[in-house]
Image: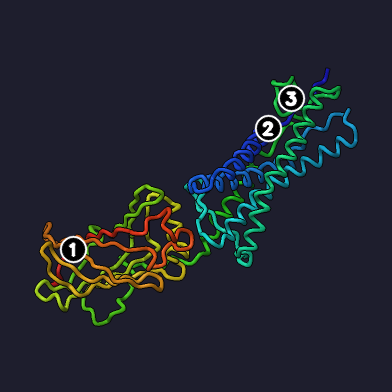
Amino acid sequence: MTRSPRYSAVAIALHWAIAFGLLFMIWLGWNMDGKESWFQFHKSVGITILILTVARIVWRLMNPPPTAPTDLKPWENKASHAVHIGFYALMVIMPLTGWLTVSISYDFDIPTVIFGLVSWPDIPGVGFLSNEIGYGIISNIHSKLAYVLFALLALHVAGALKHEFGPEEGVLKRMLPGLFGKTGKPAPPPHGFLVAFGAAIAVFAVIAFVPKLFSAPAGPQANGGGAPEASDTSLQPNWTVDYDQSSIVFTFTHDGQTYEGSFGDWNADIEFYEDDLATSEVLVTVNTGSAETPKKLYNDSLKSAEWFGVSSFPEATVHLSGFEKTADGYTAEATVAIKENEVTVPFNFTLDEEGGATVMTGNTSLERKPLDLGQKSDASAAYVSEAVNIDVRVTASPDG
């Protein structure tokens, strides 16, 4: 007896991977409120489904599925075909509407980082939807598609069970070979694996990496070639900084966990006289795009408009003046300018001699709200601490 052919191994693997991925994505969506890591995982799963769907569509075009059982009634054949079209449409529309939803969010701005590794851009040209009405419509469509999926799933399962336990030829064995009976090999032999998955990888690469090739640079280099000139031309530096032995470190808490980051690119013009503090002055220029933390999500967030706004404000400045001697060392007034905001805070520091150079170790604390940092998505400091501690170490030698 001739056995009906089964689906190819690739088609079977993609079928179940996408099916379980969709169900898991819906479960995450219903349970991720207040859980930032789950939200990121939900987005990562959704984009993965979208990319796998590209592979599945190309594979299906190159490897037609087994023909429907010959004993199906015409209306059953049409219904089965319609359900399959619905599934393919949902595999594309659900991730796309989710991607569109995060692209037009108007009251928070959290970048998408796929599985914490790859930055994923927003959909371009959809700014006109970034308002309460537009966001509400798209997010509502995205969430309600889950119920459409469940309706199609019910029809799909009901049809499969009807054929399995009715007088017609069973179909479950085609997608679960060996579990519900034996089948013949796929006919014709499957082909096009590299084409299908190459297309999926190409789509992923074009979306994830090509926009970066055309994006504006984060800003000029602050040290080591191309240093920006100080805005205060009256300042006459008399110290040379060893940037390899110097650092600007910031410490903050997010969701109860403490994290540390640093700026990798900055320049300091130092005019400092221990015996003439009144005329001492320091100007530090920081490339805000050089901020690095242990998590790529944080790095991308810091570059966004609601944090440093790197594309519009590539530099922040710190101006130190009003130096005074204290019992523990020194203090100065630090005027910090980030974006279009400016605050003045005390900066306490000490000076020590190490290996023939002078080491300045200092610290201060900045509040996010006066500097308009993260006020769109976390103005109440529910997730990110309001206070950010700054620790500075500068190794320098006097000129001459």
Question: Mark 2 — residue?
Answer: 12
Q: Amino acid at mark 1?
A: Phe
Q: Position of residue 385 (x, y in %)?
A: 37, 56
Q: Position of residue 78 (x, y in %)?
A: 86, 39
Q: CA distance from mark 2 to mark 3?
A: 11 Å
Question: Mark 3 — residue?
Answer: 173
Q: Position of residue 236 (x, y in %)?
A: 21, 78
Could you tell me which secondary element the residue under label 3 belongs to? helix
Q: Which mark is residue 10?
A: none
Could you tell me which secondary element the residue under label 2 belongs to? helix
Circle nearer the viewer, 3 or 1: 1
Is the residue marked by circle 2 packed among few (<14), some (14-19), or many (20+) residues within 10 Å? some
Nearer to us in this view, 91 or 150: 150
- Tell me whether circle 2 and circle 1 mark residues in contact (CB < 8 Å): no
- The residue sitting at 87% across, 30% down in the picture is 72
Q: Is residue 195 something that shows in the picture?
A: no
Q: CA distance from mark 3 to mark 1?
A: 74 Å
**Quadrant where the N terminus lies?**
top right
Q: Amino acid at mark 3?
A: Lys
Among the two numbered marks 2 and 3 on one chain, the one whose residue lies closer to the N terminus: 2
| Residue found at the far top of this picture | 1
Question: Mark 1 — residue?
Answer: 349
